[in-house]
Amino acid sequence: MIALQNPPVQPPDLRSVPSNAPDHCPGTESELAGKADACAGCANQEICASNTPKGPDPALPLIRERMRSVKHKILVLSGKGGVGKSTFAAQLGWAFASDDATQTGIMDVDICGPSIPTILGIASEQVHSSSTGWSPVYVQDNLGVMSVGFMLPSARDAVMWRGPKKNGLISQFLKDVDWGELDYLVIDTPPGTSDEHLSVVQYLKESDIDGAVVITTPQEVALQDVRREIDFCRKVGIRVIGLVENMSGFVCPRCKTESQIFKPSTGGAKKLAEEMGVELLGIVPLDPRIGKSADYGVSFLDEYPESPATTAYLDIIDSERDRLSYIIVRSTDSF
């Protein structure tokens, strides 16, 4: 007796999944839109099933208008948690803002684990509103930050939100925060590919995201998730600016011997970058003072300029600027 296999189910186009959709949404362009089991109880079920085109999200023109004053928008992604993504995002913001003429913002959309306020030393601050919208919390005159961490009664309070509420807050961060004129907006995301990532991509799809920097550590268990992260970027049309390998080796401050704490058993980020056809922006060695700086809310780059990790960070940021310039030139030439 021959067993018949069901035809493979095609995954939905992530760009056609509404921001307030439930898990396993087939997408608005699917033949199963409004009819699949996952559609039960969804606010969009009736309109999807009727094949009536849904009107545009009323937040989109407001976001588009707000983002016109932001020159560059950079996502910081990681497949796995604990690889130093938020720390890198903070150092990136500090490095951009080290030039007094460069206006920088950091938007923390890691809603369930907002660590950016602690890393930047502003965890006790609160958000204030004015006639022009919410005001970012400023680390210094040219470095503003917005995070759900500023809105919690206590740092111990858990954020237990489903997708629609997360999406609503991200929409508010983009349309209601008075960022002003920015040269760079660095967007720190949670690990993986979840509601927060889809929301940012959908809300900014008409505002030109420059690209994503993907953070990893050398071991294969982290690299597996990075492959998925890069695949996500390609499916939703986000450029990968490059890959950064964190915690690549530890140099003993006394004997200067380097030890591989996380052994790159499958070639690390260098091999992965070749395999996936992306740029390796650089490799950052382990330095225990990075964690110490994050705990105390001070800039590692300013506190320890002699560290090999500081040199690595600054080289990576220079490479990132070069990549952004290259992307802009290519985009201009394509018109």
Image (cartoon, rainbow, N blue to C red):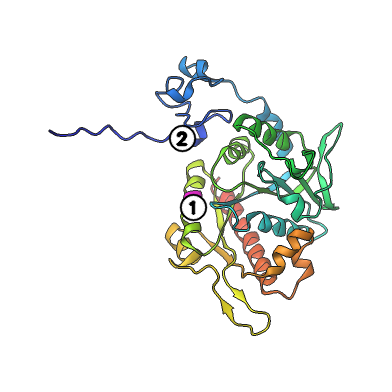
Residue 13, numbered circle: 2
Residue at 76% x, 53% y: name it.
118
Image quadrant occupied by the N terminus? top left
Q: Pinpoint residue 88: horizontal percent, then vertical percent.
A: 66, 58
What residue did someone put label 1 on? 225
Q: Is any atom of residue 147 visible in this view?
A: no
Q: Residue shown at 75%/72% (left/top)?
A: 305
- Other-residue count near label 2 (Cα within 10 Å), few / some / many at <14 / 14–19 / ≥20: some
Camera sees residue 149: yes
Secondary structure of residue under mark 1: helix
**Amino acid found under the numbered disc labelled 2:** Asp
Say whether residue 184 is left or right of residue 276.
right
Residue 133 part of the magenta segment? no
Q: Which residues are magenta?
A: 225-230
Residue type at mark 1: give it: Asp
* Residue at the image position 80 percent from the left and 55 percent from the top: 121
Determine whether the residue tagged by mark 2 lies in a helix, strand or loop. Answer: loop
In this view, the residue farthest toward the bottom is 255
The x, y position of residue 78, in whole percent, is 57, 52
- Can residue 229 be found in the magenta stretch? yes
> Residue at 62% across / 64% down in the picture?
319
Q: CA distance from mark 1 to mark 2?
A: 20 Å
